[in-house]
Structure formats: structure tokens, C-alpha cells
Amino acid sequence: MTANLLAPAPGGRLELDGPARAGTGAPLQIGFDELGLPLSEVTFVVVDLETTGGSPTQCEITEVGAVKVRGGEVLGEFQTLVDPGSPVPPMITVLTGITDAMLVGAPRIGEVLPSFLEFAGFGPTTVLVAHNARFDVGFLRAAANRLDLTWPSPTIVDTVALARTVVTKDEAPNHKLGTLAALFGATTSPDHRALHDARATVDVLHGLLGRLAPLGATHLEDLATIADPVPHRRRRKSTLADGLPSSPGVYQFIGPGKEVLYVGKAVNLRRRVRSYFTAAEKRKRIGEMLDLTQEVRTIPCATDLEASVRELRLIAELDPPYNRRSRRPDRRPWIRLTDEPFPRLSIVRSVPAGTSDALGPFHSRAAAQSALEALQEAFALRRCTQRLPALARVDARACALAEMGRCGAPCTGGQSVEAYAGIVGDVRSGLTTAAGPVVTALRSRIGNLAAQQRYEEAAAERDRLRAFLVAARRAQRLRPLWRCPELVAARRAPSGGWEIVLVRYGRLAGTSTVPRGVNPMPAIEALVATGEDVPPPTSAMGAASSEETELVADWIDHPDTRLVRLAESAEPLAYPVDGAAKYPVPPTS
């Protein structure tokens, strides 16, 4: 079990995997502004308390001492005795030297705590440091609760936990403050007085950070992960993130032969790349990739959407060995009707543009097969694979499906081309706009099987219905974008201003940002004029992979997105009335 470096339990390790919020032991997600912050830019407020006992709920603070440092320079000190409102126990007096007489006229904690918080000035780049932090922070938090003050919940660094990582038993028999102060040659000897102990803790902190730097602990978030079981050779590579931008973009891990090993995208490039070299990354394959990595290349992007799209395109283009998704988007299967007098359903790899009787693309052939079987359950379409002429052969024999009433037997002349065409029309609607017949047929089948306690067969039919609905929803959502020559949309950026997106035939043709207070219309006109020229596609899937068009659709569907321009020839951005979105998708088993 790894030690948590932020607030360990008294006398032992706090068994958490990440940083903890002061005084609670609950996991803490470090704020965005704190991630990737060099330690030289962090303000450390090192605090020590003296109290009347060990319980924050039953005992009181008698002295507060704190030192504020940044980059090795002392910025200020805070020290005051505190009237606890009750006598100091004799054994505490023996330990600290603080007597009742010394506390006469001292301020109460109600005056001291606001002054201390003002001195500390906790913010995104300020960290609270203490030796055995749970003790000190527990008292401060309990006092804030009693006084109805808002505790700022700063990031906490505990020098005891840091010492457990880099100070061996051969060097020091324990991790007490006095022992560590002697080991690191502190200029102030701790003596159980708050300011003296805080000064000693400052020297101990600097000594520990000096030892941690060669292990890769050079930024604030590293202090929360330095005890993680990450090989030192891998942790040292976290310096590859130094100098990377904090903007959205795409990153590439480069191997010893300058080959691209892995492609990813991030909202904050520096923060995301650094996270790979901590215990937060647990994938074995990625660990192997990191050991091979020699360099990290980045492509900054204007928006998160652009980064997501670039990631997809680079994975498809470069086929990196350690990426598993979206590597061959052009080979996804479809379901379509064959072109013959008596069409049947077939799974194919590509569908020409303008085809109106196809469903897809599917993520796998198995999903396509399940959806095909759902359609066959709903419609009495022939399933034999031979090509049938318009006129039946004299020697043809009907199959078992015809005897069961599941096929009109066009092979034997039992069904004319005209009669069969009516069924084909229903199937074509099921592939494109009308999911109702398929849902009704499959639900009926599931209900009958369940009533007969044939639950495994009912589950198989449920999975077929799910495969059909998932694919139909996706296709009906994306088809208007695949066929749209041009679309411009805009959304308010989180920091103000606008994000603008240009889409042509489902492909992201351009994106830009407009600062707050600037008229976006000139930028929109410039984007339309300079955006990628996308010719009409030759595939029914538009001019991009379905994953890319889905990313665009997600962005457009956001409640804050506004449609600025839509080509006159474009279809409405809407689902069919009886489309798959009308019906709930069955859960997976």
C-alpha cells in the first residue's frame, strides 16, 4: 500500500491513493491551476500548533506559528499565543513550557484564526505544510467549524509522508521533527514552540525537496504521487512535459527510431503528458510505451474539438502501435440491400454516396450481424445467398423458412417481383427512417421467449434489438451532416468570446476563436473563405470518419451552440418521426 503524502494518519500511513483534503481524509482533486506548477513558484505556508491535548474536539490551541516561503525565500512569519479558555494541563506545560501565566491577555482563537488565514492567503498556488499535518490541520479545521468560518481547504503537504519516501532507517531511526532537523542541518532546533518548530519544518521541507527532485518531483502535483510505485526511470521522463503548452492540442509519444508510438489529445497538453509518469497511469501497454519514449511532440489547437478531430485523423493516418481505437475507420461494416430483382440484406465494407438503403457504419462485424438478424426477424425477406432471376427456375425448391411462413419463396415463383418490392420498401424504411416495425417484432419475440422461460434466447433477441437501435440512432443522427455541403456553428467559449466551427459533409473544415467583445461575423466570413475545400464525398459516410462526424454532432448538439449558417440544400438537422431515437435502447446483460 502506498503512502498518501497529504495528511497521513497519526503514527502510520493513510491508505489512500491520491491527495487528501485537509482534515477530512477524503480524496482531493487538485485544481487545474495547481497542476503543472513548478515547485519554485509554489508558496508554502509552513504551520505548527501547540495545544492542550491531542483531540481537536476536546482540546484547544495555545500557540500558532507559521512561516511563508517561496523559492527558498522567507516571505513572512506569523506567531501568537492563544488563550484556550481553560487551564493548560501540567504535562503540556512540561512539554512546551507554555504556562497559564503566559496566556493571560492572549487573544482567543476567534481573533487569531482570521488573522492566520489572512496571512496565509490560500489560493491555487499556495500550499499548507506541516509535520504530521493531520494533527495541525484537524485543530485548525475544528476551530473554523466552531467559529462558522469557511475553511479554505488548501492542498496539504505533510513532511512526515515525504520523509518516509526518501529518508531510510539507516539515516534516521524515525521521522520525528527533531530527528529530521538534525539530519538536514536545520538552522533552528525544534523545541515544541510553534514558531521554532515551523522554522525547523521549513528547513526539513527544503531538504526533502532537494532529495525528491532527482526522482522527478519538480512540480506541485508530483508531491502527491512521489510515493506511487512508478519506476524511477519512468518518473524521470516527466521532464519531457516541461515546456509543453497548457493549451488544448494533440500529443505524440516518439520512440527511439523517431516512430510515433502513441497519439492522444488533451485539454491541457502539459498536464496530460505529465500524468503519464505517475501512478495514475496503470495500463500495462502504456507503461511499455513510456519506457520506449524518447520525445513528446505536440500540436496546439484552437479548441478542444479541433484537438479531438486531429487525434482521430492522426491515429487513422499513422496507425500507432499503442493506440487501439479508431485505427481503421474506413473498414467499418454496413448493412445494405443487394441490387437484384429480389434483394436481400448483406454486410458490406463500403456504400456509395446517395445510397438510400444502407445502415451503418457498425463498430464491428458482430454488431452488424446482430442488427441484420433483427431486421430479418421483422421482415419476411429472403435469406438465401444465391442471386435470383426475375423468373423462377422450374427445378427450384423452397427452403424451410418458406414452409414456416418466414419467406414468400420467390425462388419457386411463390412471390412476384412486384409483391416482393413491397417488402423491400418496408425494409428500406427500417434501414433509414422507421424503426417501429423492428422494435415491435423484436419486443414481441422477446416477450414470447420470456413467457416460455427461454431466457437465453430472449437475451439474444434483446442484444439484436440493441445492436439495431444503436446503429440506427447513430446513422439517423449523422446522415444530415454527411449530406450537408456547409454548416457554420458557434458557441460561447468558457473564458468569453466565441468558438466557431465550419463543417462540410460531416468533416471539420475549420475552427477558430473570437475574443470577448469582438464582433464574430468577420471571423466567420474569413473561416468560410479559408476553410478546407471539401468536395462531395463518394461514400455514404460523408467526407470524414463516423467518429469525427460524431464529435462534430456532439459539439453542435450542446445547448450553448448556435447555428449560424446552413446550406440551402441541406436536410433538416432532425431525427425521423419514427426513428430509433423514439425507442429506449435495451441495457446490456
Image: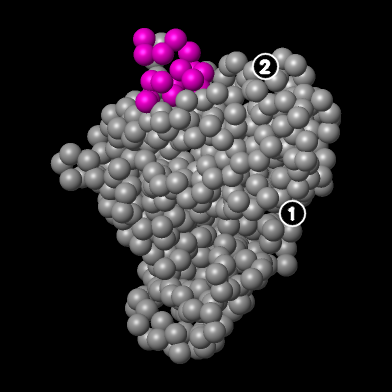
Q: Residues within 10 Å of mark 1 (few under 14, many from 20)?
A: few
Where is residue 390 shown, x and y percent of the image?
50, 59
Where is residue 564 shown, x and y percent of the image?
56, 83
State the residue position of label 1: 583
Q: Quadrant of the C terminus?
A: top right
Q: Residues within 10 Å of mark 2 (few under 14, many from 20)?
A: few
Q: Viewer-proximal residue, 419 or 344?
A: 344
Q: Is residue 235 left or right of residue 514?
A: left
Please give the name of the residue rendered at 82% of the width and 47% of the height, measured from the top-left corner.
148
State the residue position of label 2: 94
Q: CA distance from mark 1 to mark 2?
A: 76 Å
Residue 183 within the magenta-colored segment of the rendering: yes
Where is residue 469 shown, x and y percent of the image?
65, 51
Please give the name of the residue rendered at 54% of the width and 52% of the height, measured from the top-left corner.
124
Residue 119 within the magenta-colored segment of the rendering: no
Element at label 1: loop
Marker disc for residue 339? none
Which range is magenta?
A: 170-185
Q: Of the residues under marks 1 and 2, which one precedes in the sequence?
A: 2
Q: Viewer-proximal residue, 534 or 492?
A: 492
* Residue 556 quadrant: bottom right
Compared to 114, does 233 lie above or below?
A: above
| Identity, as a three-letter code, of the amino acid under mark 2 | Val
Compared to 69, does 250 lie above or below?
A: below
Residues tagged 1 and 2 counted as in contact (Cβ below 8 A): no
Q: Is residue 32 left or right of residue 452?
A: left
Q: Nearer the viewer, mark 1 or mark 2?
A: 2
Where is residue 483 shown, x and y percent of the image?
49, 73
| Identity, as a three-letter code, of the amino acid under mark 1 | Tyr
Q: Is residue 536 left or right of residue 484?
A: left
Q: Viewer-proximal residue, 418 or 517?
A: 517
Element at label 2: helix
